[in-house]
Image (tube, rainbow, N blue to C red):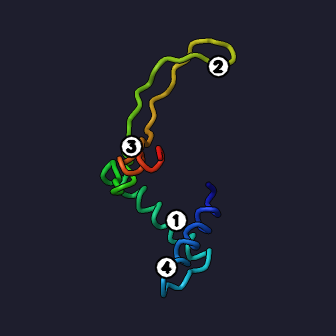
Amino acid sequence: MTRRELIEYVQRQLDEGEGVGVPAAREVGRILDAAFAGIVEGLRREGRYSHPGFGTFTIKEQAARPGLHPKTGAPIEIAAATTVRFKPARELKATLES
């Protein structure tokens, strides 16, 4: 799903509600951007963000490790990195499996 498809999906969901004015795509985009910025801020401050029924994002430190160059097969050192891990909630898993 692309950003535009997500915006259109949110607009359709809001359109189905009673008495709710559907915001323009630009406004929905700004709302989504703000929500994702909030998730990033939660990760920066606390190292995790949890959304009930969806899952939990956590910061994970990955240590440096040896590896192989894919073309030459020569040994290389893969640098340490900070990444984000996602653990889906039971409800999300159940939805995807049905």
At label 4, which amino acid type do we have? Gly
Quarter of the image where one finds residue 4 = bottom right
Q: Name the residue tied to disc 3.
A: 87
Image quadrant in which the N terminus is located? bottom right
3D distance between C-alphas at marks 2 and 4: 52 Å
Disc 2: which residue: 70
Q: Earlier in the sequence, mark 3 or mark 2?
A: 2
Residue that label 1 marks? 33
- Is tag 2's residue or tag 4's residue first in the polypeptide sequence? 4
- Gap between marks 3 and 2 measured at Cα: 29 Å
Say whether disc 2 or disc 1 marks the residue closer to the N-terminus. 1
Q: Residue furthest bottom?
A: 19
Give the CA distance from mark 4 to mark 1. 22 Å
Q: Is residue 82 above or below residue 19?
A: above
Q: Is residue 26 above or below residue 89?
A: below
Which three-letter amino acid code belongs to the residue tagged 2? Pro
Sort mark 4 into few (<14), some (14-19) or many (20+) by Cα contacts within 10 Å: few
Going from N to C along the chain, the mark reached first, 4 or 3, is: 4
Dot placed on the residue nearer the N-terminal end, 4 or 1: 4
Q: Is residue 27 left or right of residue 91?
A: right
Per the rendering, the mark at residue 17 is 4
Q: Which mark is nearer the camera, 4 or 3?
A: 4
Position of residue 30 measured from the top left corner of the image (x, y, whole percent): 54, 71
Q: Nearer the viewer, mark 4 or mark 1?
A: 4
